[in-house]
Image: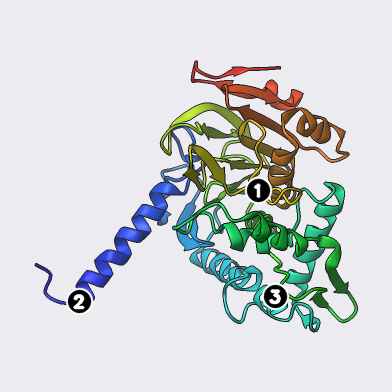
Amino acid sequence: MFKNKKTVLLLAALIIIIAAAAGAWLFMGNKGDDQAGSAQNGSRTPADGEPKSLSQQFYIYDTVVTIKIYGDTVSQKNMDDIQQMLERMDIEFSRTKEGGEIYNVNLAAGKNAVAVSDETLDAVKLSIKYAEEMNGLFDPTIGPLVDLWNIGNGGEKVPSQAEIDKAKSLTNYKDIIIDEQAKTVKLAKAGMVLDLGGIGKGYAADRIADYLREQGLDSAMINLGGSSIIGLGTKPGGAQWNIGLQDPDKSRGTQLGTIKISDEVIDASGVYERYFVQDGVRYHHILDPRTGYPGQNGLKSVTIMSPNATDADALSTGVFLMGYEEGLKYLESLPEKAEGFFITDDNKIYATPGIRERLVLTDPSYSFGN
């Protein structure tokens, strides 16, 4: 028996953290230092000729963040700086953390504008840009629908149509009012809820990459819970990062294939992340602003590859809702470099040409559909 309540609470907290770490990864790499989800905290004494490296895990953004940095000048201060950045953005961008900037914007919805930091203003402006470019399929004001469905927090059930219609009436990115000179954000209607969850992790990953480059550190693996992964530069020696791709039907760590990246982002959204089943129907967390319901288009997941994690994060939501045919056309029409592949319910993979050439399938139950 445990001797006191403090011991019990500490063990319970440890179990929660371990469980979160085990369930966090969308991707798992092959054997080697680029194995996503396997980084160990602390530095490693390099053998002769090997570069110095430092790795650390943080539990933030409700997930496990793993950072591994290579470079002779890397130090614990770099990790401490990254932790402070993550903690700051986690509070700034959260719609649920009291005192955060987005929380305050939502609190003042329909009333007054709220002054925000340059960082938050930038993230909100980017969200509006993505919403405009994808005709509202990506919508940062989806918060009322997210709160209504509450998927992933227990006790889920399909809301009534009246409830969905009310939440939909409060979902419109065009009702975000930005004053760049005053650095304020205002929501036009009471009850609106700004939600930056669609780009938050990607934005944070980009800021970490920017910081590392500024520090002269250009070889790193940045993994925000598996949903946003940056292979910064290349591995020491010039080899590409080898990333294993999660099988959406299997337990974490079971891969369907591999792909190599360098100075590139890989980001995914899927119906297997958070969902519930009611009357034999799976309702997942990717909500369609047009209908107010989870998108139902025969897709299991979408994976986006891009030089920019914020772009990839937003695209993975928007093109999922487009479906694979429209989504492929949209990706191929973009002026910036963006690649992707879609996995359908029948285990077919539909990929843009650049991905089709690089993706190595290792599970015979999957095959290319195009």
Residue for badge 3: 106
Residue for badge 2: 5
**Where is residue 21 shown, x and y percent of the image?**
41, 52
Residue density around tag 3, few if under 14, some if 14–19, many if 20 or more, within 10 Å: many
Secondary structure type for disc 2: helix
Front label number (2 vs 1) = 1
**Where is residue 199 shown, x and y percent of the image?**
69, 56
Kindly identify the amino acid type of the residue bearing the numbered disc 3: Asn
Residue 318 is left or right of residue 103, and the answer is: right
- Image point 76% across, 27% down: which residue? 325
Kindly identify the amino acid type of the residue bearing the numbered disc 1: Tyr
3D distance between C-alphas at marks 1 and 3: 22 Å
- Image point 58% across, 27% down: which residue? 345
The answer to which quarter of the image holds residue 253 is top left
Q: Is residue 62 above or below residue 313?
A: below
Q: Is residue 81 above or below residue 116?
A: above
Q: Is residue 34 above or below residue 17?
A: above
Residue for badge 1: 293
| Any part of residue 40 in sight | no
Front label number (1 vs 3) = 1
Q: Is residue 359 above or below residue 19?
A: above
Secondary structure type for disc 1: loop
Residue contact at pointers 2 and 1, CB within 8 angstroms: no
Q: Earlier in the sequence, mark 2 or mark 1?
A: 2
- Image point 46% across, 49% down: which residue? 24
3D distance between C-alphas at marks 2 and 1: 43 Å
